[in-house]
Image (cartoon, grey):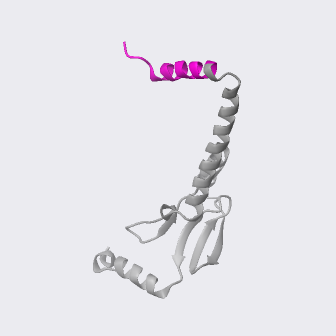
Amino acid sequence: MPRNPHNLIEEEDKHLKSDLGQDYGQICEILAIAEKHYFNKRANTLKTAHPLAVQVHLDSGVAWGVLVVRRPEECADLIRTILTNQLSFEIVRELGVTELREEKTECPYRVVTQDPKLTNSFWNFYLTRDTLEE
């Protein structure tokens, strides 16, 4: 009969607890702090600088942002506001970009460049004869 992988982990955890004694709790606390720091840093990177934080919808050319939250309660509230059409935004202009930023998460929701050459190059790709006929 195959072993349940969860039981295997539980057995290893029991052995580790007995081997480490009082140090086990401190090690778990240190790992939890390190993990929290790591995931907060990842969330911040995704909200502010990661190239996948804003993706272009290939059919329309619209740059869509990713809304990042860190707690289940925030996620539930964000889903509720999306489904009830109650998202709030602010317009932010900085570093050659205009952002429509969602207020609760402070994440970019839509992004437009203020550089005329980039704008022209971008829309030349989307304003082809095929897209104009649709």
Left or right of 4, for residue 71: right
Residue 21 in view of the camera: yes
Taking depth in this image into account, of 132 and 8 the one nearest to the observer is: 8
The location of residue 111, given as percent across then percent down, is: 54, 72
Left or right of 127, for residue 54: right
The structure residue drawn at horizontal position 54% and vertical position 21%, both measured from the top left corner, is 10
Span highlighted in magenta in the image: 1-18
Residue 71 in view of the camera: no
Left or right of 17, for residue 58: left
Location of residue 87 by image quarter: bottom right
The structure residue drawn at horizontal position 67% and vertical position 44%, both measured from the top left corner, is 73
Taking depth in this image into account, of 130 and 46 the one nearest to the observer is: 46
Location of residue 34 by image quarter: top right
The location of residue 36, given as percent across then percent down, is: 64, 45
Is-magenta flag for residue 50?
no
- Quadrant showing the N terminus: top left
The location of residue 116, given as percent across then percent down, is: 48, 87
The structure residue drawn at horizontal position 61% and vertical position 43%, both measured from the top left corner, is 35
The location of residue 117, given as percent across then percent down, is: 44, 87
